[in-house]
Image (tube, rainbow, N blue to C red):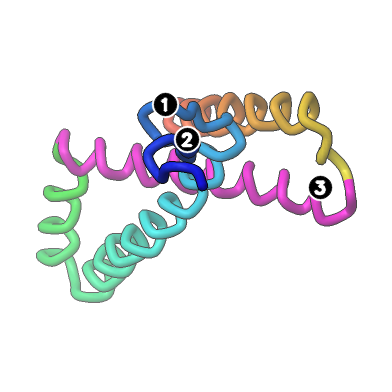
Amino acid sequence: MKNASNRPLSPHLQIYKLPLTGILSITHRATGVVLAIGTLLVTYWLAAIAGGEESFNSANAILGSWFGKLVLFGWTWALFYHLSNGVRHLLWDIGFGFDIPTANLTSKIVVGASFVLTILLWIIA
C-alpha cells in the first residue's frame, strides 16, 4: 500500500498556468456581471432625463467626472469584450474553432477587438 503523502498532487493554481481560453472564459462571466451592474447606471441616466433638467444636470455631473468617465470606459470595454467573445461562442456553436491553435488565435482576436472597438467608440463619441 502506498503512503498517502507520496501520491501525486493535482496542479495548484500557483503552479498550473491557465490557458488563455480559460482566462477568457472567466473574464466572460465577470463582464456579464459588470454589464448587469452597469445597466443600473444606464437606468439612472434615463431616469435623470425623465426627471427634468435639474436631475439630468446632476447625473451628467456624476457621469461626466473623471471617475464617471473611467467607469463608463470600463463598462464600454466589458460590453465589447462580451460581444466579441459571444461571437466566438456562436462560431463554436456551428463547430468552428475547437482546435487549440484556432482557439488561441480567436482568443487573441477577441481581446484585440474589444480594445480596438472601445477606443474607436470613445474617439467617435
Relative placement, left or right, of 56 versus 50 is left
Q: Distance of mark 2 from mark 1, alpha carbons? A: 6 Å
Instruction: Judge depth for marks 3 and 2 and give the one in front.
Output: 2
Q: Where does residue 24 sit, x and y in percent of width and height? A: 54, 39
- Under tag 2, what secondary structure? loop
Q: Residues within 10 Å of mark 2 (few under 14, many from 20)?
A: few
Q: Residue at x 43, y 35 (%)?
A: 6
Position of residue 41 in the picture relative to residue 55 (left or right):
right
Image position, residue 30 (x, y; %): 41, 51
Q: Residues within 10 Å of mark 1 (few under 14, many from 20)?
A: few
The quadrant where residue 102 appears = top right
User: Relative to residue 93, is residue 111 depicted above or below?
Assistant: above
**Is residue 63 a member of the stretch shown in magenta?**
no
Q: Where's the C terminus, which quadrant? A: top left
Task: Name the one closer to the observer, 82 or 99.
Answer: 99
Q: Tag 3: Cα neighbours inside 10 Å, few (<14), some, or many (≥20)?
A: few
How far apart are the alpha carbons under marks 3 and 2?
31 Å
Q: Which residue is mark 3?
A: 91
Query: What residue sits right under mark 1 in the picture?
Result: 15
Q: What span is colored magenta in the figure?
A: 66-95
